[in-house]
Image (cartoon, coloured by chain):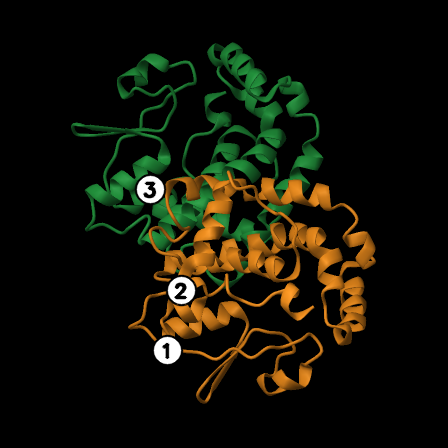
Chain colours: A green, B orange
Amino acid sequence: MALAHKGLEFESVPWRFTDKEAIAFSGHGTVPVLVDGERTVADSWQIALYLDAAYPDRPPLLESDQARGTAKVFKFWCEQNVHPPLLHIIMPDLFANLHERDKAYFRESREKRFGATLEQIGADRAGALVALRKGLDAVRPVLVEQAYIGGAQAAFADYILFGAFQWARVMSPARLLEPDDPMYVWRERMLDLYHGLARNALGYPVWA
Amino acid sequence: MALAHKGLEFESVPWRFTDKEAIAFSGHGTVPVLVDGERTVADSWQIALYLDAAYPDRPPLLESDQARGTAKVFKFWCEQNVHPPLLHIIMPDLFANLHERDKAYFRESREKRFGATLEQIGADRAGALVALRKGLDAVRPVLVEQAYIGGAQAAFADYILFGAFQWARVMSPARLLEPDDPMYVWRERMLDLYHGLARNALGYPVWA
């Protein structure tokens, strides 16, 4: 979404959890990794900063110091308040739809990280759904007033939150939002951006 | 803080909860109310928008669409996740330090709003303190990297969060943050801004 926002051409490379060798050159064990000519940048926040610095004539992802600071707070907030309930909701589907090759790695690494079995993490989907929707109370009223968190145009803050929903979408059929929720309308808008870039992304029904 | 940020001279008028007549001209029953010549603007968010529109040559409180959108999310987040635990922590002091004239109004309006007695609201201060500090986990890492949420300069997002702390500070001696917390360091910085504007504000020990 960030690359499309900048109007940059790109090629995306399919990747699985255990393909560590494929990204070893980056010095990081996790995606995203951006390769731009001679430059390699890992981590989505660092990639956003890099893209704005390298392509200042393109639409900004983080258009000012104030936007950068509040978007970074928003990033941590999403990681702490949106990702966890989402993970709890989609865990059964996420694990079921993983490639067989990734399952052992995923189970071991996540069970260690969270100190619970995958089955325990995914045990209270209903409670996690309530927490997810309630957590969005801070964002919802803004999206009643304007199309995107960024205003009339989507901004990196929109992509931060949308990325979580897209992650869930390509792995799980779980119904996260109801159609009368402004968050649902916003998510539809995000799915439509850049000629349906995210809507057309491949998900579990295709690779299963 | 917003007026000082804009470098505008102002006179502040002491006000109590039950002084409804004093602000009746604004059409609002709550503060803040700004009077700027012929214009009257109520509500802190509206005041920030007004000040930026009316004084575009002064330092911006919300310097771009992206900054405005994420700051508004931050505002709702503060109202939903910082104000409630703060209120629970300071409630006993808040009520004790109110002017006698305001006590009946405060008790009736707050007990109706929260569906609980003031004593119930203030019953679990220790739990509320944990919730407050944990809630700040999204902001804290940003303030490790930079002086203010707005970057090298304070922005309206800083004033939104600081306003909550200042409200607590003028009403209660409760220790909300520990000195080794980056939030404490940031709050000290905010208290120092504009020649100690907030640090020098009168609080309960003076008017008690």
What's the CA distance linking mark 3 and mark 1? 34 Å
Question: For this rendering, which residue is in front, B160 or A134?
Answer: B160
**Residue carrying label 2:** B194
For the point 50% across and 67% down, the residue is B45
Question: On the same chain: label 2 and label 3?
Answer: no
Helix, strand, or loop for circle 2? helix
First-in-chain label (2 vs 1) = 1
- Of A129 and B16, which appears nearest the observer? B16
Residue B130 versus residue B189 in the image, above or below? above
Residue A95 is left or right of residue A189, and the answer is right
Q: CA distance from mark 2 to mark 1?
A: 21 Å
Which is more foreground, mark 2 or mark 3?
2
What amino acid is at disc 2? Tyr
Observer-nearest residue: B195 or A30?
A: B195
| Residue A10, picture quadrant | top left
Same subunit, tags 2 and 1: yes
- Secondary structure beneath dot 3 equals helix
Tell me the quadrant of the picture where the C terminus of chain B can be found: bottom right
Badge 2, how many Cα within 10 Å: few under 14, some, many 20+? Answer: few
Q: Which residue is mark 1?
A: B54
Q: Secondary structure at mark 1?
A: helix
Amino acid on which the number 3 mark rests in the picture: Ala
Q: Is residue B203 visible?
A: yes
Q: Could you tell me residue A158's position as x and y percent?
A: 43, 47
Per the model, the C-alpha gap separating discs 2 and 3 is: 38 Å
User: Which residue is drawn at the image coordinates 57% and 54% (left, top)?
Assistant: B78
Q: What's the residue at 60%, 25% (across, down)?
A: A91
Residue at the spot of label 3: A2
